[in-house]
Image (spheres, coloured by chain):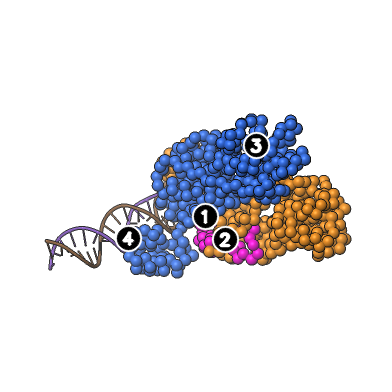
Chain colours: A blue, B orange, C brown, D purple
DNA sequence: CCGTGTTGTGAGAGCGCTCTCATCCCGCCA
DNA sequence: TGGCGGGATGAGAGCGCTCTCACAACACGG
């Protein structure tokens, strides 16, 4: 039953220490001894006891992925599965476990802070925090390795892996401009979130570099959800707004725009070209299918895990920041 | 730094054993002693060392959630976040951690088997396995607590939490029948998966109880994806098939049907009423919005966690099976 | 007043592992 | 041939906790 180091040592005719050395792949062991030990390990199907190891090394070989409640709601789509796949692909190779933490209240979050602080987990991956979440700062301060996915509002000094939202929006709007569109409406996300801000910035830059005058009435406020976007576009049309394209900061909002446009008896893409953001399942299922900006979610997961491993390996250096490129997928809604 | 039991004992003027008793909420401690110890614990912000505890109790207080690769692809939508929220809500209260395992190959899966077997995790939650995955049987055999989400094909004796797919389909088709529809097409999922089978069963039962003759040509084979469904319905129409409603076993397929119907210049819901399954984001965003069967995903997570805790608490009894009810959400696509 | 039972508390032995030292062995140079 | 350096191995001490057992203290019946 109990496969212990001891048992392996006995079987291989060496000491515990030697087996330990072999298991940990470390240095000074004769090739021959190593072979013998490895055979014994295989024969006994020995697997090290994580708890015992943790007890002495003071590492748990597991990192937490913190998904705050609001986030859970926001992300539909295969965001999480993909992110997690990416994270686990890298973590798995390093023999690290991924522990899922889903604080559902401020109280939970506080508890979670203490939890992490007390060394139950080697580090924490935080995704898409809202505005001024104190968690990353708190943890980083105490020396807990932290990697944040998505740029947090506050300029805290932690490792960040982000998708280039500015570039994504830039690509989308450039595409519309290349199609000859000039009056391009954008529907933004909630502007207290950095992705929303960045996408708006990208939109503006694209217009600017094309020498198109900035017209604030073309910037409609949305919240990443479909309904508000539809209403915003309806209001815009009702107010007599002229436009020949829409760049929505999410696919759901693009669908909202689509339905407003259709009600106004305008055609997509002939009259109005539409581009969304996320390249979600929605994009493919809409009619016409939505041109959209694809984000490398899985890669983001991998980068987060890599950053974490780096921090675990080496004492904390300067905070690094990785920004991943996006890709514009052109489909029917922008006339291809 | 090191908040140990010892330190608390010292501070409270008692022995380690007594502190341990207090921490584990167990029996025989004078109320007064307990008070003193609790105060010391609070003052020192003591948190038990999980590794040390595991080492002696042989329990890790964490359970694994196994998400096989294919599953990851299949589930879009907030399926995972919701499931995980449900699981963690219950697990968290019992101070159990959720560890995410995402085997990406058969090799990984084998490794995972050994992993679980070697006592690194107290139990495993498995979701939506394909056909004859040997994992649940293997683990259950070795006495590892296992809870499967979604009924596996093989009749293995493990705890199962499932959503009532038969009932869901029944609700959907009854609704169509109540609307006066008689020639109801169904687009099925891949029939090697139990949800697909069950939904087909529900469809047939509904027809039968309404005394509508079973017509196999109305059962179109799909794969839960949009494209195949659209093509299937297109072929059906091209072949001169008559119908006045569609029940699709997934929202994505319902959208596929929708687009085929539209191309044939038929109106939804006037000519053809459509009902989907999953009540995903797709359902809301489609035009018209899709009537769809909603599944209690979060509740499913909670039930899975509860079943797991029950197994962890008591030695293995007879396998239990929990089936959760679904709810039909009626929207525009079936004419309200 | 002693024996017995009951209850709260303490002492101490590990759980399986890592890691520091000490030890041993071997080759090599003087 | 003796001494020495260096590399491979073993012995042993914990890591922080739980849990068994022994013990102390007290109540109570005979």
Q: Judging from the image, what secondary structure is the residue with disc 1 in?
A: helix
Q: Judging from the image, what secondary structure is the residue with disc 4 in?
A: loop
Kindly identify the residue that appears in the image at 47 percent across and 49 percent down: A306
Label 3 and label 4 in one chain: yes
Kindly identify the residue that appears in the image at 47 percent across and 66 percent down: A45
The subunit letter for the residue under badge 1 reads: A
Q: Which residue is mark 1?
A: A89
Q: Which residue is mark 4?
A: A28
Image x and y of residue B182, in percent: 86, 57
| Mark 3 or 2: the one toward you | 3
Q: CA distance from mark 4 to mark 1?
A: 31 Å
Magenta segment boundaries in residue numbering = B108-137
Q: Which mark is residue B144?
A: 2
Compared across the picture, whether A27 is left or right of B184 comes to left
- Marks 4/1 in contact by CB < 8 Å: the verdict is no
Q: Which mark is residue A182?
A: 3
Q: Earlier in the sequence, mark 1 or mark 3?
A: 1
């Amino acid at each position: 039953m109990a496969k212990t180091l001891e048992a392996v040592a006995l079987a291989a005719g060496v000491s515990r220490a030697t087996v330990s050395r072999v298991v940990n792949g470390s240095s000074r062991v004769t090739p021959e001894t190593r072979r013998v030990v490895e055979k014994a390990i295989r024969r006994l199907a020995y697997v090290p006891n994580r708890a015992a190891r943790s007890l002495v090394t003071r590492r748990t070989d597991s990192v937490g992925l913190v998904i705050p409640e609001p986030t859970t709601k926001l992300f539909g789509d295969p965001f999480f599965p993909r992110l997690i796949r990416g994270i686990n692909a890298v973590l798995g190779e390093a023999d690290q476990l991924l522990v899922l933490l889903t604080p559902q209240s401020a109280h939970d979050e506080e508890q979670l802070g203490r939890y992490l602080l007390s060394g139950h987990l080697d580090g924490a991956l935080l995704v898409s925090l809202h505005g001024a979440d104190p968690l990353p700062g708190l943890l980083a301060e105490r020396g807990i390795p932290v990697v944040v996915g998505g740029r947090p509002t506050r300029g805290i000094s932690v490792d960040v892996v982000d998708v280039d939202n500015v570039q994504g929006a830039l690509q989308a709007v450039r595409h519309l401009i290349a199609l000859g569109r000039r009056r391009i409406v954008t529907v933004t996300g909630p502007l207290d979130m950095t992705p929303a801000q960045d996408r708006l910035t990208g939109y503006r830059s694209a217009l600017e570099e094309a020498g198109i005058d900035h017209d604030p009435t073309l910037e409609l406020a949305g919240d990443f959800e479909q309904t508000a976007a539809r209403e915003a576009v309806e209001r815009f049309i009702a107010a007599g707004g002229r436009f020949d394209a829409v760049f929505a900061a999410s696919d759901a909002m693009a669908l909202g725009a689509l339905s407003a446009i259709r009600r106004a008896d305008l055609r997509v893409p002939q009259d109005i070209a539409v581009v969304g953001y996320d390249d979600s399942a929605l994009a493919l299922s809409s009619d016409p299918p939505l041109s959209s900006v694809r984000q490398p979610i899985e890669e983001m997961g991998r980068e987060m895990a890599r950053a974490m491993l780096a921090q675990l390996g080496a004492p904390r250096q300067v905070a690094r920041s990785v920004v991943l490129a996006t890709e514009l997928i052109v489909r029917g809604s922008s006339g291809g």
